[in-house]
């Protein structure tokens, strides 16, 4: 039964709830951290890879830095980071943009508890003073506990692919943002255009089957709502935002990440196997690791073929009178 439940969690076969997302991160995060050899940092993103680097933690910091520049953090003061994970990106942004005040929101209480210790004690640049400028809030993307017109910017840094739905998140964010406020997303997306040319509607059963065929193992192994670029762009416009900038960086994410995995698979497996006590755990690991390996190869393949991308989007809340 335990194995069945773990398989259900790790293979995205059934419709997943927010609770399942919490359980998934609770069960997988220790392995991800061991795999990337990260003892004190706790970033959870795919990374931005330069020169075939073998340093996963560095790639994750690079993505975080690129996102900060893209979001233009120098122009805003009070931001919410929704899906903040262990707040490692927030800690980095605070040291790069000391004027920022960051409200870290995550649905996962366990991650926030660890983040609290990390923000106060474990980060070289942090101090109780810096903690004043990073707050931790346990909430969902669709029920953000802030008043009307309060924030300069809301960011979702590799988290909106989980949101149910992204449209709800955009709607809630709009009322919380000050007039002229901004949203910035870093989000893995599928590009359905080669699959369903020119069509923009919600995905029906036939398209979904086609998508399943194209994504292969990734359709099941990747904990994502599989949003496509057009749906996101349309949703942003429909919810009263104007896209200011849009960047596609998938080639710097998936292909080098997969190559890193292939090059380091032996070491990663070795590090992980050492942490398992029982035969059952090890058997289960063999199954999940093989799925991860095949998924990494599939990601590379889809990225090369333009079916999978990673986009950065910055959009501004439109003033009501600008529309009319
Ligand atoms: C891939 S991790 C990224 C974490 C962080 N941004 C980073 O780069 O380290 C996605 C995060 O989104 C959070 N998340 C998923 N669904 C959420 C939701 N509906 N509301 C708030 N957070 C959510 C997860 O708990 C997880 O911490």
Image (cartoon, grey):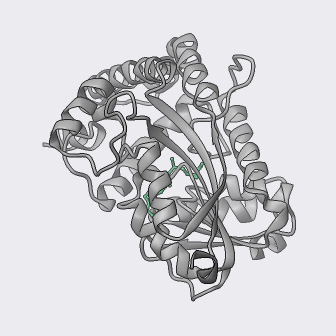
- The percent coordinates of residue 199 (x first, y second) are 33, 42
Q: Is residue 258 rendered to the left or right of residue 140?
A: right
Classify 299 as above or below 4. Answer: above
Residue at 79% over, 57% down: 72
Q: Quadrant of residue 125?
A: bottom right
At 23% from the left and 30% from the top, the residue drawn is: 210
- Image location (x, y in percent) of residue 171: 46, 73
Work out whether residue 152 can be spotted.
no
Q: How many marks?
A: 0
* Residue 103: image location, x then y, percent: 65, 72
Residue 226 vs 272, above or below: the answer is below
Please determine whether, in this image, residue 170 is positioned above or below residue 230.
below
The residue closer to the viewer here, 114 or 310, is 310
| Residue sitting nearer the eye, 280 or 108 | 108
Mark yes or no: residue 314 visible. Answer: yes
Which x, y percent locates residue 106? 51, 64
Quadrant where the C terminus sits is bottom right
Farthest-out residue, bottom: 147
Q: Quadrant of the N terminus?
A: top left
From the viewer's perspective, tell me whether residue 143 is left or right of residue 283: right
Q: Give me the residue at 37% from left, 18% from top.
A: 294
Q: Locate residue 310: give its quadrant.
A: top right
The quarter of the displayed image where residue 2 is located: top left
Q: Residue furthest left?
A: 1
Along the horizontal axis of the image, is 61 left or right of 46?
A: right
Residue at (21%, 42%) from the top-left corner?
8
Most foreground residue, 256 or 324? 324
């Amino acid at each position: 039964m335990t194995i069945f439940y773990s398989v259900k969690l790790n293979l995205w076969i059934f419709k997943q709830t927010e609770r399942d997302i919490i359980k998934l991160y609770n069960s997988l995060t220790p392995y991800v951290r061991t795999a990337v050899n990260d003892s004190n940092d706790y970033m959870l993103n795919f990374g931005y890879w330069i020169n075939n680097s073998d340093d996963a933690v560095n790639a994750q910091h690079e993505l975080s830095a690129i996102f900060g520049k893209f979001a233009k953090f120098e122009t805003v003061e009070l931001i919410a980071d929704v899906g903040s994970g262990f707040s490692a990106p927030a800690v980095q942004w605070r040291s790069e943009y000391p004027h920022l005040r960051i409200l870290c929101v995550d649905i996962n209480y366990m991650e926030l508890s660890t983040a609290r210790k990390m923000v106060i004690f474990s980060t070289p640049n942090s101090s109780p003073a810096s903690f004043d400028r990073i707050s931790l809030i346990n909430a969902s993307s669709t029920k953000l506990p802030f008043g009307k017109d309060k924030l300069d910017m809301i960011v979702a840094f590799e988290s909106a692919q989980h949101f149910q739905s992204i449209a709800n998140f955009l709607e809630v964010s709009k009322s919380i943002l000050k007039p002229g406020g901004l949203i910035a997303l870093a989000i893995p997306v599928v590009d359905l255009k080669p699959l369903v040319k020119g069509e923009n509607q919600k995905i029906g059963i036939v398209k979904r089957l086609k998508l399943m065929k194209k994504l292969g193992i990734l359709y099941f192994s990747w904990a994502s709502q599989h949003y496509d670029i057009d749906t996101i762009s349309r949703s942003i416009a429909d919810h009263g935002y104007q896209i200011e900038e849009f960047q596609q960086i998938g080639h710097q994410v998936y292909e080098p990440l997969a190559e890193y995995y292939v090059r380091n698979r032996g070491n990663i497996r070795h590090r992980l196997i050492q942490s398992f006590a029982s035969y059952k755990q090890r058997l289960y690991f063999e199954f999940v690791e093989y799925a991860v390996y095949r998924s990494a190869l599939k990601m590379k393949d889809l990225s090369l073929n333009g079916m999978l991308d990673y986009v950065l989007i910055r959009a501004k809340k439109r003033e009501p009178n600008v529309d009319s």
